[in-house]
């Protein structure tokens, strides 16, 4: 091992001297060389670019991969320079589950055949998502990462070197100032007497020594100034390259948006095709219904995807999935509020009435509800002031 004690001692001395100068500047007891305004503006712009690029990069990673453990795994694979293993998307996994379930239920049954159709389209959606993730990672995330881990590290290194050169320059300026003050003091107050010529010789020698010290300090100052100016120019050139970085990131941003638009267009197309496929089998959908229950609905799609078909049941969840009445619109005008049996209910979600027999709802409002003989059990009659109409049970929280 090559151990140079002399170099180590010299580096430690330089570090200590710079630390003293930096501390004195912070305390206001030492002068500080200020950078020119243009360079200061470039530094501020570069810091702004770095901070926002880092935030956009991190949040895009979260958008593309919400699972933090998966992101950590990918990070380690990148640092180890190994290929990231292929990961199945959620859509592909859901599609595979549906296809496997169809095998057990029977591909020839209405439910099994529908599961096959929906599962195939879910797999297509998962494939589109995979392609979107890969395209975004290559065209958007990679350039941002390259800037943060490449260009910005180079800029940071040169800025630290510029700061060290500035500290060295200020140290040399302070040294020259102190040497000149000592030289002037020695020249203004000569320590000699006519009876003691030896003191005059000593004073003259001290003045000459301080003069040599001033010359040496000025030479060091010229060298430090040259190194500082050279480093300032190098740093300026790197910082001016931030403009080209913005242009590159702008192009990457357009590619990212284009990838998103393509992905969502594919999803929309696949869902339209799936709706058309399912609308061909309304009888199969109806045959899966169990008239004896209104809490389970075996169909994998909502009534909105099957024009003209009313679902026979309603899933008992808090999400909007409304069973429509098969017996036609109820004549609300003829319904009267019973003297007993009515209750207050809190509306959980906004609901827009589909016809004049229904009542539109606003989340968190309180209404009066009651049942009517012969009415679908999934619906109640609701009243709000002078307004009256049918309301879905799943949108309400009945109060005592």
Image (spheres, rainbow, N blue to C red):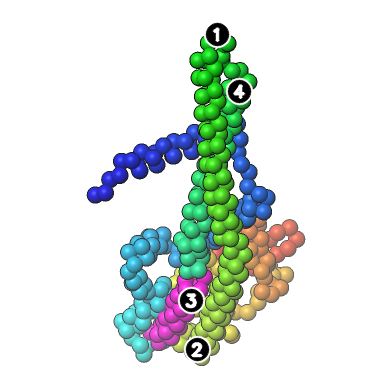
Q: Earlier in the sequence, mark 3 or mark 1?
A: 3
User: Mark 1 Cα within 10 Å, few/some/many (few <14, many 20+)?
Assistant: few
Q: Is residue 245 left or right of residue 103?
A: right
Q: Which residue is mark 2?
A: 277
In front here: 39 or 85? 39
The residue depicted at 73 percent of the width and 63 percent of the height is 387
Q: Are marks 4 and 2 in contact (CB under 8 Å)?
A: no
Look at the picture and state if 182 lies above or below 3. Answer: above
Q: Which callout, 4 or 1, points to the residue nearer the camera?
A: 1
Quadrant of residue 330 within the rendered picture:
bottom right
Q: Which mark, by number, is residue 195? A: 1
**Predominant SS of the magenta segment:** helix
Q: Which callout, 3 or 1, points to the residue nearer the camera?
A: 1
Q: Which mark, by number, is residue 187? A: 4
Label count reads: 4
The residue depicted at 60 percent of the width and 67 percent of the height is 244
User: Mark 4 Cα within 10 Å, few/some/many (few <14, many 20+)?
Assistant: some
Look at the picture and state if 150 lies above or below 2. Answer: below
Q: Which residue is mark 3?
A: 135
Does residue 282 show up magenta in the picture?
no
- The answer for how far apart the CA atoms under marks 3 and 4 are is 76 Å
Q: Which callout, 3 or 4, points to the residue nearer the camera?
A: 4
Could you say where residue 399 lies in the image, as x and y percent from the top left?
57, 52
Residue range corresponding to the magenta coloring: 112-141
- The answer for how far apart the CA atoms under marks 4 and 1 are is 20 Å
Q: Earlier in the sequence, mark 4 or mark 2?
A: 4
User: Mark 2 Cα within 10 Å, few/some/many (few <14, many 20+)?
Assistant: some
Q: Earlier in the sequence, mark 2 or mark 1?
A: 1
- The answer for how far apart the CA atoms under marks 3 and 1 are is 94 Å
């Amino acid at each position: 091992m090559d151990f140079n004690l002399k170099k180590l001692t010299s580096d430690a001395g330089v570090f200590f001297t710079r630390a003293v100068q930096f501390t004195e500047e912070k305390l206001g007891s030492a002068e500080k060389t200020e950078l020119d305004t243009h360079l200061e503006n470039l530094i501020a712009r570069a810091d702004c670019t770095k901070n926002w690029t880092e935030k956009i990069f991190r949040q895009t990673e979260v958008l593309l991969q919400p699972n933090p453990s998966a992101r950590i795994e990918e990070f380690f694979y990148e640092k180890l320079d190994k290929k990231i293993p292929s990961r199945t998307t959620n859509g592909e996994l859901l599609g595979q589950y549906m296809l496997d379930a169809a095998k057990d239920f029977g591909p020839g049954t209405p439910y099994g055949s529908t599961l096959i159709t929906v599962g195939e389209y879910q797999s297509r959606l998962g494939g589109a998502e995979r392609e979107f993730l890969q395209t975004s990672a290559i065209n958007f995330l990679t350039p941002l990462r390259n800037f943060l881990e490449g260009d910005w590290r180079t800029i940071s290194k040169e800025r630290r070197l510029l700061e060290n050169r500035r500290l060295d320059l200020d140290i040399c300026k302070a040294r020259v100032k102190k040497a000149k003050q000592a030289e002037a003091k020695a020249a203004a107050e000569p320590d000699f007497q006519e009876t003691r010529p030896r003191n005059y010789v000593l004073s003259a020698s001290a003045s000459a020594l301080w003069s040599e010290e001033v010359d040496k300090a000025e030479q060091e100052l010229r060298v430090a100034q040259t190194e500082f100016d050279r480093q300032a120019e190098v740093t300026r050139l790197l910082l001016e390259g931030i403009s080209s970085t913005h242009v590159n990131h702008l192009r990457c941003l357009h590619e990212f948006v284009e990838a998103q638009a393509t992905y969502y267009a594919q999803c929309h197309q696949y869902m339209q095709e799936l709706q058309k496929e399912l609308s061909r089998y309304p009888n199969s959908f109806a045959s899966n219904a169990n008239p004896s229950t209104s809490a389970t609905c075996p169909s994998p799609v909502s009534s909105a995807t099957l024009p003209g078909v009313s679902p026979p049941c309603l899933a008992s969840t808090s999400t909007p999935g409304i069973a429509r009445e098969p017996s036609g619109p109820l004549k609300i005008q003829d319904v009267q509020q019973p003297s007993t049996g009515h209750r207050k209910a809190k509306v959980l979600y906004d609901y827009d009435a589909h016809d004049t027999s229904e009542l539109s709802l606003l989340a968190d409002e309180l209404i009066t509800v009651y049942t009517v003989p012969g009415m679908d059990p999934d619906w109640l009659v609701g009243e709000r002031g002078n307004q009256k109409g049918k309301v879905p049970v799943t949108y309400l929280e009945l109060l005592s």
